[in-house]
Image (tube, rainbow, N blue to C red):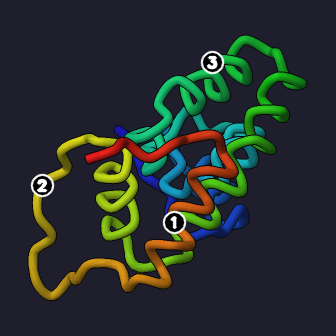
């Protein structure tokens, strides 16, 4: 009944919507708004684990026809989504971000490994730029 579109291809998403009755969900946070604009109905979000209210605001704004708020939320979320997921394979940076925020995300399992010190520094900068502070341990 649903498909998680994570290929990054609006052409493929358009074809799925044109040829099926499937509900299309974005599987790429940075493409949530573009996919919704062609008929997608939501997102299976990564950053929604650390900023759920912001992702919910984007989706609800678009669904209610408040395009300017949806666009503003997209522009706010875009650098966080892009920078967080450029550090390493998901869920490595997400788990590190959650740890920085004092949230329990469980351990990484091999073959995944923790972020390097340089990647962790970049993650902290990304979170700080977004307005997310680290929790003192």
Residue drawn at the location 73% of the way across and 24% of the way down:
62
User: Where residue 117 appears, x then y in whole percent?
Assistant: 41, 82
What residue occupies the far right of the structure in this picture? 68
Q: Which mark is residue 47?
A: none
Vertical placement of 40 versus 11: above or below?
Answer: above
Q: Are marks 3 and 2 in contact (CB under 8 Å)?
A: no
Count of residue discs: 3
Q: Which mark is residue 123?
A: 1
* Residue 32 lies in quadrant: top right
Q: Earlier in the sequence, mark 3 or mark 2?
A: 3
Q: Earlier in the sequence, mark 1 or mark 2?
A: 2
Which of the two marks, 1 or 3, is nearer to us in this view? 1
Vertical placement of 73 versus 118: above or below?
Answer: above
| SS type, badge 3 | helix
Residue drawn at the location 48% of the way across and 47% of the way down:
47
Q: Are marks 1 and 2 in contact (CB under 8 Å)?
A: no
Residues packed near mark 3 inside 10 Å, few (<14), some (14 to 19) or many (20 plus): some
Residue that label 2 marks:
106
Give 6 or 126, whichever is nearer the viewer. Answer: 126
Which of the two marks, 3 or 2, is nearer to us in this view? 2
Residue drawn at the location 61% of the way across and 59% of the way down:
126
Residue drawn at the location 82% of the way across and 22% of the way down:
69
User: Where residue 21 appears, x then y in whole percent?
Assistant: 50, 38
| SS type, badge 1 | helix
Residues packed near mark 1 inside 10 Å, few (<14), some (14 to 19) or many (20 plus): many
Vertical placement of 24 versus 7: above or below?
Answer: above
User: Where residue 49 appears, x then y in whole percent?
Assistant: 38, 40
Left or right of residue 18, residue 1 in this image: left
Where, quadrant-wise, is the N terminus in this rendering?
top left
Q: Which mark is residue 60?
A: 3
Q: Earlier in the sequence, mark 1 or mark 3?
A: 3
Left or right of residue 105, residue 33 in this image: right
């Amino acid at each position: 009944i649903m498909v998680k579109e994570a290929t990054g291809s609006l052409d493929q998403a358009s074809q799925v919507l044109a040829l099926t009755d499937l509900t299309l969900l974005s599987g790429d946070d940075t493409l949530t708004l573009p996919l919704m604009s062609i008929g997608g109905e939501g997102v299976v979000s990564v950053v929604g684990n650390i900023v759920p209210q912001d992702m919910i605001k984007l989706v609800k704004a678009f669904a209610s026809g408040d395009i300017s708020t949806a666009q503003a939320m997209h522009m706010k979320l875009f650098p966080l989504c892009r920078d967080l997921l450029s550090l390493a394979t998901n869920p490595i940076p997400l788990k590190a971000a959650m740890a920085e925020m004092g949230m329990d995300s469980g351990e990484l399992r091999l073959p995944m490994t923790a972020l390097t010190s340089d990647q962790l520094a970049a993650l902290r900068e990304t979170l700080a730029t977004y307005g997310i502070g680290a929790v003192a341990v």
